[in-house]
Image (spheres, rainbow, N blue to C red):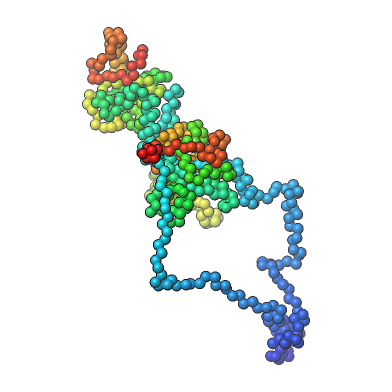
């Protein structure tokens, strides 16, 4: 039996009897996860120096902007309402061109996003009109602060630099685009609701006969059985909600520009039902259009004739 | 075993003690939360201060209010360009009592290519995109052709023969069935062209009047062969 220490030993003696320098030094483990006895890495940047001939790390916001510089448009796009489709004929050649007709409605520059404040350059565009009783107080303050009427649709168009920031409050009409130029359109496509695999992903379905019963349009097996893991792989295409997501159509030709009526006639079809909002911007796959509107100042846009009369009266 | 280890290292109980006891060098910091905000109940009889009303700017003039039907605007401008005389429009206009209807035998003359004749079994009215579907039999094979009535390639459309009774359907798709198939309309068209030629010869450049047979019409008075 070992000798037991008296209980008085359990308490530390007073400080003057046992100064702290006499106490054993316990190892200080400051590293959060695990610990190491190696020297701290003092020269971790020596492999990534600019002189090392290695590519510079491109993970900064500035580098991100630089990467985007080639694809960001020089000027803002517009918001339009899809009105429907028709066709144009070339009187000489007789060639028929199906076209989509969109109309611009009170498209105005609402605000700017700047590199200093927000980290990137963008133009906030608004279209349509909303009664002020239908706008929240915060949003109304935003519009009024910029001197713009409340807008029904608001969106952002990124631009390359501050020269693309059109003046706040400037009205933009269809002559923002020129006939023959190419644009990209973005709009929400028609929503189909919950759809099966055949319609949603083009699955084949199953046979009409040979003993098939009530399974003609089913997707069939959703994965291998035991041996294959007995599980459904992530991303397996299945029935679900179809449509209603944004679809971009690139390089759409502008066939006609009607500044009187605010109409743009675009080549072919664009996504979405009639009455949907379409974002139209200069095509990123074609050379930028050479228009004076790029440099800050918005060219004098034609306003709808009704206002002219109203102002004159 | 524990007892033996204790006997070997009698001071081992010290280590745990020393480790657990707070070192006198380390000061125990009792963190206290700074109360930057605190709940202050509203006074019961606080005066009601209404929020300042935000003024809304009036909307600018609207293209939408000015042009309510943009499609119509584009279509009318296109029709004015493609059909300046208005003949194509009137031939298929519903307001025109002498308009062509389904069931009539129509002859379409083309700018490049042979003329095509057939029974009209469908008129698709879509403004400038309107078209007609003609059915005929060529070399004993049924042939159907769509023609856009405003297409510049269509030089003219003539009514060769009218249907005796008005068709009671908008689309005469049943005429594709063998029971109702008209077969070739070549003979009717040839007879029509012969009579036209004879008439032309007799009139010799005189005014082309209304023909004897139930309202044959010429859409375009372009030089017929």
Q: Quadrant of the N terminus of chain A?
A: bottom right
Image vertical order of residue B112 relative to residue A3, above or below? above
Give the residue at x 45% y 33%.
A257
Picture quadrant where residue A296 is located: top right
Please say whether residue A284 is visible from this viewpoint: no
Give the residue at x 45% y 72%.
B41
Q: Give residue A69's position: percent from left, percent from top.
A: 60, 43
Q: Give residue A173's position: percent from left, percent from top.
A: 46, 38
Q: How many marks?
A: 0
Q: Give residue B212's position: percent from left, percent from top.
A: 23, 16
Q: Give residue B153's position: percent from left, percent from top.
A: 40, 22
Q: Nearer the viewer, residue A186 or A132?
A: A132
Image vertical order of residue A283 relative to residue A29, above or below? above
Question: As drawn, is B67 to the left or to the right of A283?
Answer: left
Give the residue at x 34% y 22%.
B85
Question: As drawn, is A282 to the left or to the right of B216?
Answer: right
Please say whether residue A59 is visible from this viewpoint: yes
Image vertical order of residue B10 relative to residue A284, above or below? below
Q: Nearer the viewer, residue A240 or A181?
A: A181
Q: Nearer the viewer, residue A176 or B121?
A: A176
């Amino acid at each position: 039996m070992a000798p037991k220490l008296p209980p008085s030993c359990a308490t530390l003696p007073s400080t003057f009897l046992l100064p702290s320098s006499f106490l054993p030094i316990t190892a200080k483990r400051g590293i959060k996860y695990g610990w190491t006895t190696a020297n701290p890495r003092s020269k971790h940047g020596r492999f990534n120096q600019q002189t090392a001939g290695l590519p510079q790390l491109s993970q900064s916001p500035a580098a991100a902007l630089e990467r985007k510089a080639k694809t960001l448009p020089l000027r803002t796009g517009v918001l339009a309402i899809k009105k429907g489709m028709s066709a144009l004929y070339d009187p000489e050649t007789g060639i028929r061109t199906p076209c989509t007709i969109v109309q611009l409605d009170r498209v105005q520059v609402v605000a700017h996003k700047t590199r200093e404040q927000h980290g990137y350059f963008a133009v906030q565009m608004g279209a349509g009109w909303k009664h002020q009783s239908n706008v929240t107080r915060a949003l109304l303050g935003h519009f009024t602060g910029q001197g713009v009427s409340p807008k029904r649709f608001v969106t952002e168009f990124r631009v390359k630099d501050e020269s693309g920031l059109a003046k706040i409050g400037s009205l933009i009409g269809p002559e923002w685009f020129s006939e023959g130029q190419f644009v990209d359109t973005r709009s929400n496509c028609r929503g189909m609701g919950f759809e099966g695999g055949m319609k949603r992903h083009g699955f084949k379905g199953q046979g009409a006969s040979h003993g098939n019963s009530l399974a003609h349009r089913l997707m069939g097996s959703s994965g291998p059985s035991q041996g294959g893991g007995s599980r459904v792989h992530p991303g397996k295409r299945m029935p679900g909600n179809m449509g209603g997501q944004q679809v971009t159509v690139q390089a759409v030709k502008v066939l006609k520009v009607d500044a009187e009526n605010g109409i743009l006639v675009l080549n072919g079809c664009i996504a979405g039902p009639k009455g949907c909002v379409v974002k139209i911007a200069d095509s990123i796959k074609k050379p930028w259009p050479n228009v004076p509107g790029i440099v800050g100042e918005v060219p004098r846009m034609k306003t709808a004739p009704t206002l002219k009369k109203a102002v004159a009266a | 075993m524990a007892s033996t280890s204790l006997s070997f290292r009698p001071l081992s109980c010290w280590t745990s003690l020393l480790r657990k006891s707070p070192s006198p060098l380390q000061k125990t910091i009792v963190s206290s939360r700074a109360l930057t905000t605190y709940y202050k109940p509203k006074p019961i009889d606080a005066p009601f201060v209404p929020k300042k009303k935000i003024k809304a700017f009036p909307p600018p003039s609207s293209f939408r209010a000015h042009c309510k039907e943009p499609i119509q605007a584009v279509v009318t401008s296109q029709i004015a360009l493609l059909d300046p005389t208005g003949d194509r429009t009137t031939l298929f206009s519903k307001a025109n009592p002498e308009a062509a209807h389904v069931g009539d035998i129509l002859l379409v003359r083309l700018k490049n290519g042979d003329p095509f004749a057939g029974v009209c079994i469908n008129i698709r009215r879509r403004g400038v995109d309107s078209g007609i579907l003609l059915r005929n039999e060529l070399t004993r094979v049924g042939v159907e052709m769509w023609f856009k009535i405003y297409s510049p390639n269509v030089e003219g459309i003539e009514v060769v023969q009218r249907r005796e009774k008005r068709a009671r359907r908008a689309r005469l798709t049943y005429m594709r069935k063998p029971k109702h198939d008209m077969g070739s309309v070549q003979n009717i068209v040839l007879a029509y062209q012969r009579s036209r030629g004879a008439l032309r010869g007799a009139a010799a450049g005189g005014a082309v009047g209304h023909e004897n047979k139930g309202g044959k019409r010429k859409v375009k008075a372009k030089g017929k062969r």
